[in-house]
Image (cartoon, grey):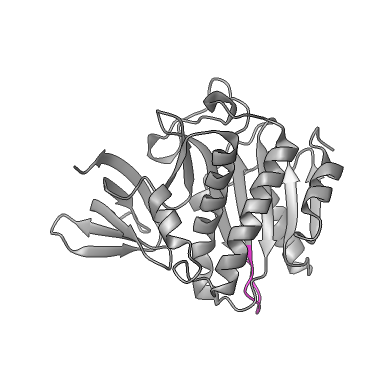
Amino acid sequence: MTDINTARLRADLAGTYARVDVVRSTGSTNADLLAAASGGAPDRTVLIAGEQTAGVGRRARSWVSPAGGLYLSVLVRPHGVAFADLGSLALVAGLAVTDLTADLGVDATLKWPNDVLAGPDRGKCAGILAEAVAGEESAVVLGIGLNVQPLGPGVEPGAGGLSPTSLAENGARTTDRAEIASVLLSALAQRENRWRDAGGDLSRAGLIEDYRARCETLGQQVRVLLPGDATLLGTATDVDPAGRLVVADEQGKAQMVFAGDVVHLRAVP
């Protein structure tokens, strides 16, 4: 086990999550829960690790996951949400992480689609990865990696040149990982309930305006690396109820971005 107080965490989340397990170290919490999902693990099963040795981010990039961080995955089986609408769940998770940072007194914003930036220099303090579960039933494993303690020297910047930062470096009122996990998972459950009841539609769930208000990508001149290595240059103008980024290209035409890596170039006056 880890120094995360598992008994306290389970007591805090009783009745909200079906199962909460904590391990000292694993390869990837997402990989573990994907396997558990295939074995019939129930809706809202949670796995937390104090360290990952083979953490993975978007586009199969490695995610540095040293001891001292918080790495968790949640299996969600949202009955009534179509498979095509599962993608917006990552944005719901982003809102939950910013609910957490607000509780901790950390200045943080969202970078579409899956990064949480903190501090005056807007370093990356958290990443989110949603992976669909193969099968007839709609299900997804939602992974959140959160830097709690400083990572130390030698950690390379992430995609788009984002330097890493942590909650501790930005004045968090606590670095107790059991408390952080409890606050985060409680916020996620509240947000995800609304999303699920709305069939995965962020607007009907009353979440889209919160996301727009917290998303620093909007109003930025951006470069988007699209699947297939195509590139889109333009201004990020909106996020739609399905979670897609709307970019006005250099000719002023609106382009819908379903997936891609976004680099903030500069804010548009």
Residue 103, picture quadrant: top right
Q: Is residue 190 left or right of residue 221?
A: right
Q: Is residue 88 above or below residue 170?
A: below
Q: Measuring from the top left, give residue 71's x and y in whole percent.
A: 66, 43
Closest to the observer, 243 or 84? 243
Residue under the image location 55 percent in, 77 percent down: 82
Tell me if residue 155 comes above or below residue 8 in the rendering. Answer: above
Dividing the picture into quadrants, the one containing residue 210 is bottom left
Q: Is residue 85 visible?
A: yes
Numbered label tally? 0
Is 269 or 122 nearer to us in this picture?
A: 269
- In the image as oriented, which residue stretches furthest toward the top? 153
Q: Is residue 10 left or right of residue 166?
A: right
Q: Residue at x 44, y 55 (%)?
A: 211
- Residue 138 x/y as whole percent: 62, 74
Left or right, residue 117 beside residue 31: left
Task: State the image coordinates of residue 61 (x, y, percent, origin top left).
Answer: 52, 45
User: Could you tell me which quadrant the N terminus lies in?
Assistant: top right
Say if the magenta span includes residue 208.
Answer: no
Does residue 97 appear left or right of residue 211 in this picture? Answer: right
Q: Quadrant of the C terminus?
A: top left
- Spot occupied by residue 206 in the image (x, y as percentages of width and height): 48, 65
Q: Which residues are magenta?
A: 133-140
> Of helix, strand and loop, which mostly describes the magenta segment?
loop
**Residue located farthest toward the left when viewing the structure as drawn:** 251
Q: What residue do we see at 41% from left, 67% from top? A: 241
Whether residue 27 can be seen here? no
In the rendered image, the vertical position of residue 176 relative to residue 253, given as above or below: above
Q: Residue at x 58, y 21 (%)?
A: 152
